[in-house]
Image: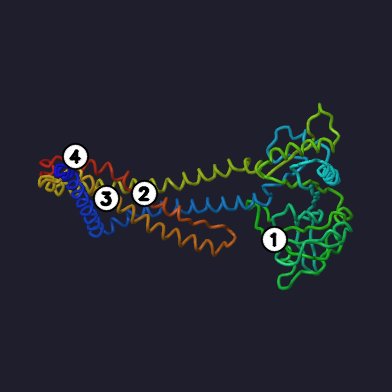
Amino acid sequence: MSAGRTGLSPVFRDMKRFLYELSESWKIAASQMRSNLTRSTLTALGVIIGIVAVTLMGTAIGGIQVGFDKSMSIFGDDVLYVGQWPWKKVDDWWNYRDRKKIKTEYADALNRMIAMTPNSNLMIAIPTSSVIRSVKYADSEVGNVLVRGTVSDYIITSTFDFKEGRFFNDLESRGGANVCVVGYDVADALFPSASPIDKSVLINGQPFKIVGVIARQGSFLGLFSLDSIVVMPLPAFQKYFTAKSEADILVKVKDKTELAEAKDELAGLMRRVRGLPPEKKDDFSINEQQALKSTLDPIKNSIAVAGLFITGLSLFVGAIGIMNITFVSVKERTREIGTRKALGARRRTILLQFLIESTALCLLGGIIGLGFAFAMCFLIGIAFPFFPIQFSTGLVVISMVVSILTGLISGFAPAWTASRLDPVTALRYE
């Protein structure tokens, strides 16, 4: 037992010495930064700017990701979209242009087939048809509004909530009543200080009574507003808006984990509706959220990589500054290093000292940079309340790790040079 303790004692002594050297190195680093305050501040400025740039870019990328996911969520991950065109880039666009238009009547045929299919993966088919029009109320007018005609069951496939009011009911839907539900932007523009419920607006010269206001949804990838919309019963839409309307069929899936099977089933039903013989290709497209996401993901990822690379260059410049100033510090303190080595200081001790000095400088710069970044994110959040700011704990941890690694990497070469100095030569250095 005694021999075991004796065998372990050198390990404990070495550990105790290492901790003492670590503590002393931090004290020396703090003393050096205080004695060369201006130089330390200017050197740390490069790291501060780099951390601010990288952190802000990371925050922006996080916000873009949240906005992207929110934009994708409007399509629903359990809804299939039958249309004339696929949601992807196509080279033979003329083949898709010549396809027969999708008709809203297909929804009724699909629903009959779904009802007659045992254990169908599909729940319900919803017809929609859309045009762009202006909406007027008194002397106010809103242009470029998406006017959509559909049925009362449309609410099953939608993801929006109501700010006030309701969706039109089945009776209003079947009877083609002149009622509508308006988006947040439309309501805010036409009725800035009053409730729009039970007020009538003019669309295409026809009066429509507002029965509901959709809560704010934001924009789709910042390209167009999701709140500039009016939804009305399909029969009323078909009565007043027949020219240049685009029709789609939305199909709700029972189990989104079996989306591929549901897609195959829907393709078979659509071929029957279209009357396509086995040898002919599909003359329609079945789209889904994931298809659009897979198309846009590479673009989003490329923007993120390019943004982080560009902002990372500023951190690289800061690291070069740290390395340069550490080399200068080694030169200035060559005699000190020689004296310490002559008195028995190990190479490890000298190496540790300069590594900690460069790391401490980067760590301080990282903390200050994070403070600036947090303040700027706070101000951006106030100035642009609809941009999803994501200043996460993970981003803070990553920024601090990056700061420490920058200090270690940029300080290693000077520290290694200092630790390899010959004490005799160092003592003669002028």
* Callout 1: SS: loop
Q: Answer yes or no: do the residues labelled 1 and 2 have beta carbons within 8 Å?
A: no
Which amino acid type is marked by label 1? Asp
Q: Residue at x 84, y 29 (%)?
A: 277
- Mark 1–mark 4 Cα distance, whole angstroms, equals 69 Å
Which amino acid type is marked by label 3? Ile
Which amino acid type is marked by label 2? Gly
Q: Is residue 349 above or below residue 187?
A: above
Which residue position holds label 3?
356
Which residue position holds label 4?
420
- Mark 3–mark 4 Cα distance, whole angstroms, equals 17 Å
Select label 1 or label 2 by which is in front.
Answer: 1
Residue 38 in the image: state x and y as whole percent.
28, 59
Which residue position holds label 1?
161
Mark sitting earlier along the chain (2/4): 2
Closer-to-camera residue (246/282): 282
